[in-house]
Image (cartoon, helix red, strand yellow):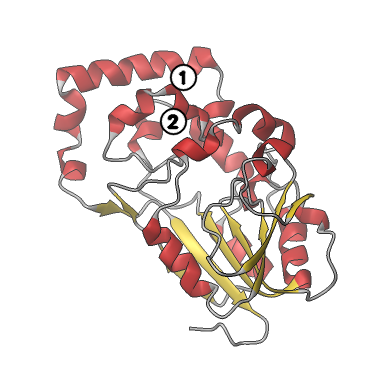
Amino acid sequence: MASHASAGTPATYDRIGTGYGQVRRPDPRLAALINKALSGARTVVNVGAGAGSYEPPDVEVTAVDPSQVMLDQHPGSRRVRAHAEDLPFRDGVFDAAMGVLTVHHWTDFRRGLREMRRVSRRQVVFTWDPAHRPELWLIDEYLPQIRELDLSRFPTLSEVVEAMGAHTVSSFPIPYDFTDGFQNAFWRRPEQYLESSVRHASSSLAELPADVVEPAMERLRADLDSGAWAEHHADLLARDSMDYGYRLLVADQSGAGRH
């Protein structure tokens, strides 16, 4: 079985987390999908909570994150600094546990998912499948170094499904005007990748050295200025959304959340 290294250590987010919330603004369409999966839960633990994106309203949420910089940006009053692999809570104390684009940052994703199952009756995880194709053009044409980094840390979709016992897997095509600036968000807005603040808010881009990223961005800038990018990607410019492998997984040990 493949092993997956964690690139999202507390130190990483202590370094790149400042101003994170300005770029990573929750998108209402993804929020609606997550809220539906959490429907009926009154107490939720958000594992890898960061700044609190996608937490359902009118629910008692406990935010867990290993990075104090990220927790300091969280608006809630229940904030716990801890790792997913060792949640400091009693068995079954929460109605649900949620995790949004966080599993790939854990040192041991299977142990973290077991912990989510231990402390809650329902688990809702939003993740990305590294085996999905097509691949984002940014990787294929400008920064293939991202591919190796992502493959080294993202567990496959099937691995996560098996580890959490997921009974529901929902696809989430990314809308062209998506507001949450994670790595694939700007697939139809290539000029956004030229902004350092945008790259800084994506852990993969932030992890790459400047002498790799900056020349690639200069090539992208030149292709945008010349019109070469628009000509090559005319098909993308005609689309409203793209499926790049983002999936919402739900597991419910009581069966109440199955749909």
Could you tell me residue 52's position as x and y percent?
Answer: 58, 51
CA gap, disc 2 and disc 1: 13 Å
Q: Amino acid at mark 2?
A: Val
**Residue 144 seen anywhere in this rendered image of the structure:** no
Q: Amino acid at mark 1?
A: Val
Looking at the rendered image, the quarter that the N terminus falls into is bottom right
Tell me if 247 is positioned left or right of 86 in this view: left
Asked which quadrant contains residue 16, the reply is top right
Sooner in the amino-acid sequence: mark 2 or mark 1 = 2
Observer-side mark, 2 or 1, equals 2
Tell me if 204 is positioned left or right of 218 in this view: right
Q: Which mark is residue 26?
A: none
70 or 102, nearer to the observer:
70
Residue marked by disc 1: 213
**Residue 14 seen anywhere in this rendered image of the structure:** yes
Residue marked by disc 2: 198
Residue at position x 83%, y 73% in the image: 91
Tell me if 116 is positioned left or right of 130 in this view: right
Could you tell me residue 221's position as x and y percent?
Answer: 28, 18
